[in-house]
Structures are given as structure tokens and as C-alpha cells.
Amino acid sequence: MTSREQILAKVKSSQPDWRPLPPALTNVQNALSNPVEEFRTVLTNIGGAVIEVDSYEAIAAYIQQEFKDKKRIIATIPELSMMPELSGTIETGWENQDPHSYENVDLAIIGAHFGVAENAALWITEALMHQRVIPFICQQLAVVIRKTEIIPTMHEAYARIGNDEYGFGAFIAGPSKTADIEQSLVLGAHGPKSMTVFLLA
Amino acid sequence: MNTGTKDHAQLSDAFNADEARVNWHDETLWFVRAKRDKAAHNIPEWEALRENASQIKDNVLSNLHDYLVAFEANAQANGIKVHWAANGAEHNQIVYSILQEQGVDRIVKSKSMLTEECHLNEYLEEKGIDVVDTDLGERIVQLAKEPPSHIVLPCIHKKKEEIGELFHEHLGTPEGMSDPVFLTAAARVHLREKFITRKAAITGVNFAVAETGEFVVCTNEGNADMGAHLADVHIACMGIEKIVPERSQLSVFLRLLARSATGQPITTYSSHFKKPRPGQAMHIILVDNGRTTQLGRPDFRNSLKCIRCGACMNTCPVYRRSGGHSYHTAIAGPIGSILAPNLDMKQYADLPFASTLCGSCTNVCPVKINIHEQLYKWRQVIVKEGYADPKKTVAMKAMDFTLSNPSVYKTAGKAGRFVLKHLPFVVSNKLNLWYKQRDMPQPPTQSFGEWYQQNELKNIKKHNNDQ
């Protein structure tokens, strides 16, 4: 008997009588009268920064101002990577290289499907990353999301995801961090040292 | 962890030698517990979430066979290779054979308590494989040649000065440097080089979804992702109880996990791995290692609902004051004390007794495991099977004799009160384990029985006469 057969046989003989799944939680008391405001508060609390903008041009201006010392900037958002104003700033044609080659990316600007107000997590699948490693390997991460795409809780989040097909997807909430040394919070453990979220009107 | 034959009490003694350090450890963990409370109280439906999570896990345990079969089929359809390991040894062999097949002898590993349980690192090192733990806390204890002392906070027992010394020795940081920001930056540089050069990455699994064949890994540091997305081979190791039926139920568990663990609203990264990236090989190892035995024990099977948040450790008055290493098993604290006896009742016979049965663990558990009741039940099983500490057995027999003989009980009570009052040195010495770190109580002048005879019976008679 293989280990598979052995384990499955033992599970079958040991598992208790069938118990039904509980109904999904409904009527989640939603104290969030203003999800965008909640998202902003939570993201700030976990070390991220929220920048409200009304256009992609405003994002471009912010990047040119605040990230002008960054050498290697990549973007997965066509509105930004194709923008003439950013042609010297944002690298093009980077998408199909070995993932290790992104080790020196200073800033990656990517999109998200939606954001969750209760925990400031942004749902991002690999279609929006181009390469899975991008949001983790870059030194700084910026994410662009429309204000209308901020939803209250994780229940709405999985209702939105539904049966979507993806090879890889992640909720990302704030910069990489650790508190392993005496519970002192330090931003920038292995991944991005900062996370800027552009909330697009 | 090889601690020889020392039990929890003896290992706690070593930890308790430095009282200031014990107080610091106690306060640090209580601080985490307080953060958990704040996060939980922020969610009006917190109790409904716990109940929902608990019921989902009840369903999982009752239908685990079919869920495992479905998970395997869906994962395979996604292009993931699925392996089954009956025990730790087989799990380790599978990992090694995958590495051999790929010709890899240096790997990175993110946090996985299962691989600690299976002693994977020791096994691979014997085979000549270089394993680098990439979670900062785990890297620190690895450099110190120690096991993690906490499942979420692996080096919570270490002071920053000690970590500074370790980094000075192994990473070449300046001597005497112990600033956490500086040390974390040094570790970032040190571990980036490992991520970039290692061809295989091992991760744990927080949740595996039967319906879709995907698995979720949660970290704050991003180390699981850095390893997995850069490596040619990703090996994910999971206990068979990590299954959830449907993707949508992840909402319940992700809402509970980080809030219970550290008081964060969610971990920084909740990564859903469904398919290998083009050109990558992805493996999942489903491990039993005693879990099916635990599933067959009606009193203890609920321990398999655990989502490894560590809340029961942070709140436990014994854990906070005895340290994770005193439990001499991969998973310390209250949950570890009900999991370990299932693996080896004799070796871990001491652990269910390392508790005050105060029930705080049960109250904070996000999946409502009746931890303190199981600790109590394990004590009974362990005594019945003859694995209890002989000192305890003798004491229990003496107690049984005293409590079942009213006259002996009365005499013993009188003698006790007399001794405490007139001959306190008889009990206030180190032969009396209870006296260690405690003062003996002030003896009452009379027993309740004597008081009742004197007062209450008189009152009752008076009352009856008045009627």
C-alpha cells in the first residue's frame, strides 16, 4: 500500500461523522461608513502612504518629484509606461527577462484589482504584476487603485474574486516588515521598504 | 530539540534563573496579547467569525478524505506535483529526492512549523544540503543553533544585544551594534544574496483550498515570495489538516489569523499559489505524521483545527514565564502541549501538566479549540497509561486516601494548620515544590467544618426554634 492509500484509508476510518458547512456569514455588521477613509487610516497605520490624485498625469508629476533619485523604475500600467512625460523615467521592454534581473528595481508601479478597507490589503494577480517577483523584489512599491474599487471587508473581497482564474495572486498590505528583534517594528525586511498607494478619483 | 531527559519543570528552572529576563519575556508577550485584544474588539462580529471558522473546520475534519482527494486532483490539474508522506522521515526523503533530481545542494526555506516537526534541517544538513532559513527570526535562531521558541515569533526569547553578537560573528556587523533597524538591514543584504543564488525554495502552507487546488502562504517579510518566485523549484510542505473546502472561506481565516497572532489586520502578504510559473516546478507534500491518529481520538481531534496563530502562547501564564524551549517540542505552549502527546505520550507526558488550566488559551483561540479541556483530558490519559511523573502518582494516591477518609481528612487538616502556624520550616523549604517562588499561605485558625459546627448549626437551631 502506498503512503497515499495508507493515509487516505486512515483518514476515512478516523474522521468523525459528517458535519455540515456553516452558512456563509451574512449581515456582517459593517461599521465602515466610509471605506476609503478606513482604507487610508489602516494603510497609514501599517506603514504605507496614501496619495490622492485625480489623474494619471498627477501620478506622473508625483513620481517625477518624489522618486527622481530612483535609477530603475518600471511600471505595469500602460497609462503610465506609455505616457510621453515619463518616457525617460520609466523603463520599457523589461517584461520578459529572468526574474533575478529585477533585483535592482528601485520602484515598481503596478495596478490592483481592488483594495479592502478593513485591512488595507490590495488584491493583485500575476496579470497585473507581469512577473510574480516584481512586487516583492523592488525596493519601493507603488500601487494605483481607483477610489471606487475600495470595498469594505474580506467577505466582499472573495465574492469579487469568485472563480477567477490566476496562476498566482496576493493580497498585499503595506511595506514588507518584521518585528522579530525584540518586537521593534522595522519596515523593509526582504521586500519593499515603502508602499505608496495612489488613490485615483 | 534535544534536551535529554529534562522535563518542562526542569527546563523552566533554567529559564527562570534570570528573573529580570523572565519578566521581560512575560511583558513582551503580554504586549502582543494586548494588541490581539485591540484588533479583535475592533471587529463587532469577532465571535461570529470564530464560531464560523470553528464550524468550517468541523466540516473539514468530518470530510477530510474527500477534500484531500479533491485537493490533489485540482492541484495536479493546475500543474502541481503532489506527494504523500506518512511520517516525518518520508517527508524528508521526498524533499531530498526532489533536490537530488534537480541537482540542488543549497536552498532557502521560509517558515514552516511542519519542517521543524519533521526535523528537516538536521536531515538535509546530514545529506550535505545547505539550508538557509529566511524568516528573520528563524535565521537568528538558526545562527544561534537553537530551535524557534515560538511559532510566530521564533526568537522572542532573545535580546537584541545577543542578536547583535550573533550578527557580528556571522554577518560581520560592527561589534556592540544592536539597533534593530541596523540589524534588520544587515539581514536584508545577507539574505538577498541567498534569494538570488538559490535554485530551490521550501515554504510552508497556511491554507490549501480543496475546490481550487491552490494554497495560501502568509508572511510579513515577503520571504516566502522572494524564495518561491526566484527559484526553479518550489516545494510546499503541509500537514493534511490545512485544508479548507472553498476559496471564499479564506475570508474568514484571513480575517482571524493575523489579528489573533500579532494584532495586525492582515499579514503584509497573503500569497495564493495556484500554478507554477512557466518553467518552474512546484511540489506539494501532504504529511500525516500522527495527524490521522489524532483524528481518530474523539477527545483530541479538535486540536487539528489549529491555524498556528500563537495566540494561546501569548496569553498563557505558564508559557510567558517558562519560555518556548521548556516545552522541548517544535510547537510550544498550550496547543503544542495537546499536539505533542499524540506523537509520543511518554516523551511528552510532562506537557499537559505545564498549565494552570486557567482557560485563557481556549478563550482566545480563533477556531475555538477547547485547549484547556484537552490538557485536562490528556492528564487523565497519561496517568491511566502509566506515563505520569512518579512523584505526582504518589502525591495523587496520598490525596486520594486523604480525601476518601473523612477522619483522615480532618486530622490532616488539623496537622497542616498546626504545622503552618507553629513549625513553618517543615514546609517552607526546598523539598516542598509548591514553596519554590511562593510563600506558604497564612493558616486559618479553624477548618470550614469546625466553623460550621460552631456558627451555622447554632443559627439553624435558633432559626428552627424561632419558627
Image (spheres, coloured by chain):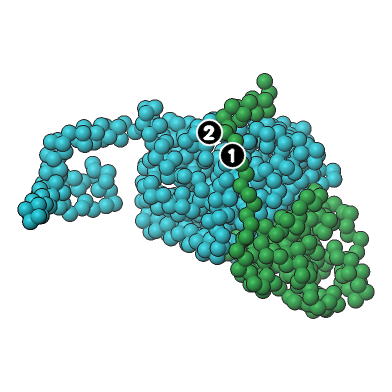
Q: Secondary structure at mark 2?
A: helix
Q: At x 58% / y 50%, what residue is drawn?
A: B52
How crowded is the residue under tag 1: few (<14 C-alpha within 10 Å), some, or many (20+)?
some
- Specify whether B180 is left or right of A106: left
Estimate the x, y position of residue B448 in percent, counting from the top left: 16, 49
Q: Secondary structure at mark 1?
A: loop
Q: Which quadrant of the structure image shows residue B72? A: top right
Estimate the x, y position of residue B160 in percent, counting from the top left: 51, 60
Q: At x 55% / y 52%, what residue is drawn?
A: B50
Extreme front residue here?
A: B467
Chain B's colour?
A: cyan
Chain designation of label 1: A
Residue denoted by label 2: B294
How crowded is the residue under tag 2: few (<14 C-alpha within 10 Å), some, or many (20+)?
many
1 or 2: mark nearer the eye: 1
The disc placed on residue B263 is none
* Residues at discs 1 and 2 both on one chain: no
Chain identity for the colour green used in the image: A
Residue denoted by label 1: A19
Q: Quadrant of the C terminus of chain B?
A: bottom left
Q: Nearer the viewer, residue B201 or B182?
A: B201
The answer to whether residue A65 is visible is yes
Q: At x 85% / y 63%, what residue is drawn?
A: A76
Estimate the x, y position of residue A98 in percent, counting from the top left: 85, 52
